[in-house]
Amino acid sequence: MTLEELQAQCDRVPFFRFLDFDITSADDESVVASMVQSERHIGNPAIGAFHGGITASFMEAIASVTVSRNWDILLPKPINLTSDYLRPALAGTLFTRASISRKGRRMASIETVAWQADPEKPVARGLFHFLLV
């Protein structure tokens, strides 16, 4: 599936359109995406930081894309998630990389990391488990 087809699949999901992210790269094991902050993403207006729920939702969205590239064949169902917030995600662009840590016949585990300017300074990390049926 090309990046354009993957983005079109994401654009069919109303909440993903609300998040308004762009898939920037994808291979067999990981997906990377970017999301430019807009007014609806702000959680702390005093410092202009992303809302933690937006950050976690962005990581979950990219994790679900990583699990299955074709939702007509396999629609991943989230069964567990953990988000660790490491520092505020300030105004600007937020990036997320989701990588498959384990994928079996019935379940997949996806690790995510979100950052802004420097991938070595993440703002959040996540672990997502999906049921594959």
Image (cartoon, rainbow, N blue to C red):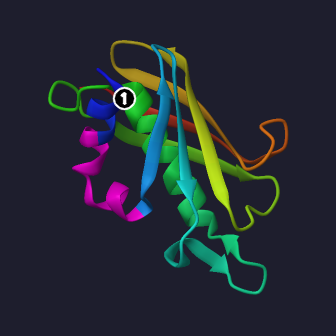
Q: Is residue 61 left or right of residue 52?
A: left
**Residue found at x 59% / y 57%:** 55
**Residue found at x 21% / y 50%:** 12
Q: Is residue 100 left or right of residue 88?
A: left
Q: Looking at the image, which is closer to me, 123 or 102?
A: 123
- Residue 76 appears in view: no
Furthest residue in direction left, as rendered: 72
- Residue 16 appears in view: yes
User: Residue 97 location, x and y as percent?
Assistant: 60, 34
Furthest residue in direction bottom, as rendered: 46
Name the quadrant of the N terminus.
top left
User: Residue 60 location, x and y as percent?
Assistant: 48, 45
What is the tally of numbered marks visible in this picture?
Answer: 1
**Residue found at x 54% / y 78%:** 39
Looking at the picture, does residue 71 appear above or below residue 35?
above
User: Residue 37 location, x and y as percent?
Assistant: 58, 65
SS type, badge 1: helix
Span shown in magenta: 8-18
> Was residue 16 drawn as part of the magenta stretch in this picture?
yes
Q: Is residue 88 left or right of residue 28?
A: right
User: Residue 128 location, x and y as percent?
Assistant: 53, 37
Quadrant of the image occupied by residue 45 = bottom right
Query: Looking at the picture, which amino acid does disc 1 mark?
Result: Leu
Q: Looking at the image, which is closer to me, 71 or 90?
A: 90
Looking at the picture, does residue 77 appear above or below residue 55?
above
**Residue found at x 22% / y 26%:** 74
> Was residue 53 drawn as part of the magenta stretch in this picture?
no
**Residue pointed to by mark 1:** 3
Q: Main secondary structure of the magenta part?
A: helix
Question: Mark 1 Cα within 10 Å, few/some/many (few <14, many 20+)?
Answer: some
Name the quadrant of the C terminus.
top left
